[in-house]
């Protein structure tokens, strides 16, 4: 099946955090150039251009992969430049797109949101959920199911790290 015939990939992952509120988690998501603190496998993330907290901000992210024998010889660095295209602190959401990369992405736009969990009493103080949605062209070498699984497991890990940061902070 050709990529044109497959169309766009769309997906969404969610993680619920029992303790932290959306307002406590949002600053971690809003800190666009510190992804290495939260996402497993990301070794480096830093600002390349633009202004922190503003659309147009570009970050560089990379991760090294060990060779099959575990040595550091022949390591391949996987990298991407990602641009913040929308940020709304009052709605606790941001969107970004992958610009340049060597991971096989042709088109990828994602939105991350920190949302309160409403248990019916309306105070929004009973935890939160983080939502990561995306629309992308198919990525060579990745079945959609595997890509969705990667997004979901990455978000579960991020949620645990953010929950620990709030509870220990």
Image (cartoon, helix red, strand yellow):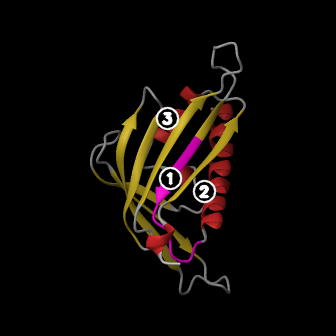
- Mark closest to the chain's N terminus, 1 or 2: 1
Q: Could you tell me which residue is drawn at 36 percent across and 48 percent down?
A: 84
Q: Magenta residues?
A: 131-142
Q: Which residue is mark 3?
A: 27
Compared with residue 50, is residue 20 higher up or lower down, i.e. above or below? above
Element assignment for label 3 = helix
Compared with residue 127, is residue 104 higher up or lower down, i.e. above or below? below
Label at residue 151: 2
Element assignment for label 2 = helix
Q: Are marks 1 and 2 in contact (CB under 8 Å)?
A: yes
- Camera-side residue: 68 or 11? 11
Q: Is residue 139 magenta?
A: yes
Q: Position of residue 98 (x, y in %)?
A: 40, 60
Disc 2 crowd rating (10 Å Cα; few below 14, some 14-19, many 20+) is some
Q: Which residue is mark 1?
A: 134
Mark 2 and mark 3: Cα distance apart in space:
20 Å
Compared with residue 165, is residue 37 higher up or lower down, i.e. above or below? below
Q: Can you say which quadrant of the picture contains the C terminus?
A: top right
Closer to us: mark 1 or mark 2?
Answer: 1
Task: Report the side of 70 relative to 78 (left or right).
Answer: right
């Amino acid at each position: 099946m050709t990529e044109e015939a497959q169309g766009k990939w769309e997906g969404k992952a969610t993680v619920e955090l029992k303790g932290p509120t959306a307002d406590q988690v949002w600053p971690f998501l809003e800190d666009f150039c510190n992804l290495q603190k939260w996402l497993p496998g990301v070794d480096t993330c830093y600002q390349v251009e633009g202004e922190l907290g503003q659309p147009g901000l570009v970050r560089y992210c990379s991760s090294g992969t060990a060779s099959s024998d575990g040595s550091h010889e022949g390591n391949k660095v996987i990298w991407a430049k990602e641009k913040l295209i929308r940020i709304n602190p009052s709605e606790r959401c941001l969107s970004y797109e992958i610009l340049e990369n060597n991971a096989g992405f042709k088109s990828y736009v994602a939105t991350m949101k920190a949302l309160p969990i409403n248990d019916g009493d309306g105070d929004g103080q009973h935890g939160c959920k983080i939502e990561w949605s995306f629309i992308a062209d198919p990525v060579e070498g990745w079945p959609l199911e595997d890509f969705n699984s990667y997004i979901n497991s990455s978000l579960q890990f991020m949620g645990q790290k953010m929950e620990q940061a709030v509870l220990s902070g």
